[in-house]
Image (tube, grey):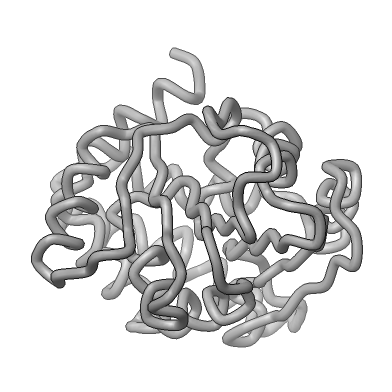
Amino acid sequence: MQKKEYIKKMFAGISYRYDLLNYLLSLGQDRYWRRFAADKLPSGLILDICSGTGDVAVEVSKVSNKSQIIAADFCEEMLKLCAQKIKDKNIKNIYCIQNDAENLSFKDETFNGAIVAFGIRNVSDIKKALTEMNRVIKIGGEVVVLEFSQPENPILRSIYYFYFKKILPVIGALISKRTGPYSYLPSSVMAFPKRSEFVEIMKESGMKNIGFYCLTFGIVTVYTGIK
């Protein structure tokens, strides 16, 4: 099975527990991380790719209620939960659209900004997805990426590895009733490019003025780039 189909099937299977597990497994920090990332975006028309259940789109809406946000994901089950969440919260400026991050259906220079949170490591071709994000934003627009990373402090890194490899998969499996997704998570994070390498990929995708912010002792990193 190709990675893309595996990821789609995996997220479809855990979609109903996804938000709860994100909160529990991040010890409640996921909300702070998303808020920090959303705050780096300009106002206007914003694209949230790999949106899942729409939590990042909701944060963008809170940061700028005058913005219009497209929440895009290729997993139909996730998008259904996104649409229900938006309806329950009575949010009027978010629209859920099924779309593939590596082959976005939007025209060039459509958006003022684009964001992806905890999704870029799941695409088959990272550079292609980043290039697509860069393509669909206007000149001067901003791309924001929120992703797991590895702490540089060796003591913190060893604790992080132990939690990620030993504890997180057990908790995830108990709650979601599935073992695969939360065994996949640690391996996908460990295989993700280092910060300096990811910055280079963003440059190769057409972005400039790239910077990054390490949050919560380097557990996650927010990257920013300008078209």
**x and y percentages locating residue 167 in the rendered image:** 36, 66
| x 56%, y 73%: residue | 43
Q: How many marks?
A: 0
Of all residues, the one furthest to the top in this rendering is 1
| x 14%, y 50%: residue | 16
Q: What is the quadrant of residue 175 in the picture?
A: bottom left
**x and y percentages locating residue 73 in the rendered image:** 39, 40
Looking at the picture, tell me which residue is in the foreground, 222 or 57: 57
| x 75%, y 83%: residue | 153
In the displayed structure image, the side of residue 23 where residue 99 appears, left or right: right
**x and y percentages locating residue 4 in the rendered image:** 48, 24
In the displayed structure image, the side of residue 181 where residue 207 appears, left or right: right
In the displayed structure image, the side of residue 201 where residue 136 appears, left or right: left
| x 41%, y 43%: residue | 72
Q: What is the quadrant of residue 74 in the picture?
A: top left
In the displayed structure image, the side of residue 11 where residue 217 appears, left or right: right
**Vertical placement of 48 versus 163: above or below?**
above
Residue 9 seen in this snapshot: yes
Q: Quadrant of the C terminus?
A: bottom right
Looking at the picture, tell me which residue is in the foreground, 79 or 122: 79
